[in-house]
Image: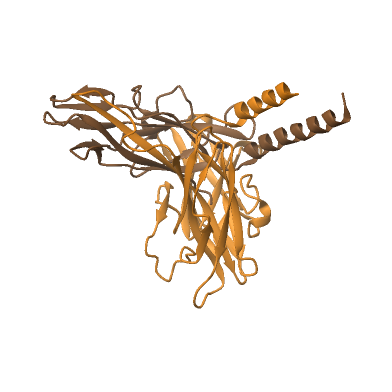
Amino acid sequence: MRKLYVCLGILILLICGKTDAQVTIAPPLVVMDRENPYGSYLVANRSNQVKEVTISFKYGYPVSDDEGNVSVQYIDAPDSSHRTAVEWVRAFPRRFVLEPMQEQTVRLLVRPRGEVQEGTYTARIITSSERADSEPGSFVNNDNEVSTRINFKFNQVSALMYRHGKVTTGVEIEDITTKHADDNLDVYASLRRQGNSPYIGSARLRIYNGENKVIKETSQSIAVYDEMVRRFRFAGDSIPPGDYTAELTLSTSGRSDVSSSVLIKAPDVTKTFTISI
Amino acid sequence: MSIVFGIRLSILIFFVLSVVNLSLQAQEIIITKERDLDFGMTFAGITQDFIIDLDDPGSAFFTLTGPRNTDIFISFVLPDQLVNNNGTGTIPLTFDDTSAGWSRRENQTPPDGNLFDPAIGTEATIHPGGGGQLGSSFVWLGGVITIDAQQPAGAYSGTATIIVEITGL
């Protein structure tokens, strides 16, 4: 019997315990509201090393340039036009050590201050981890030699949303343009959020031929906090020259990474347009 | 097989499946450092630049695993110098707009379009892979250190941070 336990233990480590893997966190989005200002997420050490974990918060959200290049913009001192929950949220514990294969539930509490308008207030959760034994200077070198080492920290960023009062969301497709460049067909969609909360959903772009058959399709997850340009790229040589009909649909469903129960629902938005290649 | 043994075995199998299930359902990006940024060792008294390109065995190498087709943003916070553990000297550490790169394939050097300034960051996508819910993409980091002729011998170190976040949230 003991041999069986040992074999199964080894099996677990082989499946889940990558040697230098960092901690995993789930879920990637924590939602709280006025009635239930408590939330939590799980931090798990799937490696065989001891990890030191630190939790912190920043205010930021995805933005894009006119070419649809997406990045995350952080604002250290947001003004009143930004709905930040950073000053309101606390994590328990904020710092801890995880032994190999150990887990820790991090509790979150949001306490709004002052007069709060209806809407969704957000923060990014920074879960920072590093080897607990990665002390600078623990490596050695010989006389007259210069040796170097860089220790790595790992910051995994997830999202926190606090909903206050009645929350609504939606998205408007303001404009769609296409461009041929570097043998690619790029479709740019200018999006603007509606309502008082970020639009978290998915976008699906389909291209139809003259027989109304789908010849190309792509989809991506989207988060529109204010306004944004999203780019959809197709390899240019994969579509023969001609005129096509395209259809862009935005939906608050279709997300595999987030439970649909925590997303604010909105009607699907569809825009049809033509593409000439 | 006794009833007690059967119950114990059932509990054990349930535990194994629960752990595996939790691992696969964690809808988050897992960062794995496969290789350190390694400039090697040199003798003091020689002025020299040590350049680590992305295709050099000394480049840092990471695997990002998560839900397939997830759009992510990758960036680094990097030290501009390494400090002697005795506090007697520093070594400048520099990066430029091609010091990092990402690829959908582990054995492929990042294509030119996927090179980026690590301090600014870049968009990337978790590669769908060969099926299933999870996929992977790969990140490399190089850099340059400058050893001065009067560089004190010793062990120099610094801390870098890799930041990964899902852009669809």
Q: Can residue A40 be seen by looking at this rendering? A: yes
Q: Can residue A271 be seen by looking at this rendering? A: no
The vertical placement of A117 against A48, above or below, is below
Q: What shade has chain A been given?
A: orange
Closer to us: A145 or A170: A145
Res A60 quadrant in image: bottom left
The vertical placement of A55 against A243, above or below, is below
Instruction: Quarter of the image for the N terminus of chain B: give it.
Output: top right
* x then y, percent, for residue B148: 14, 31
* x then y, percent, for residue A36: 64, 66
* x then y, percent, for residue B79: 29, 42
Closer to us: A251 or A8: A8
Residue depicted at 75% across the width and 32% down the height: B12
Res A244 quadrant in image: top right
Asked if residue A246 lies left or right of residue B83, the reply is: right
Figure disc tally: 0
Q: In the rendered image, what is the letter of the chain coloured brown?
A: B
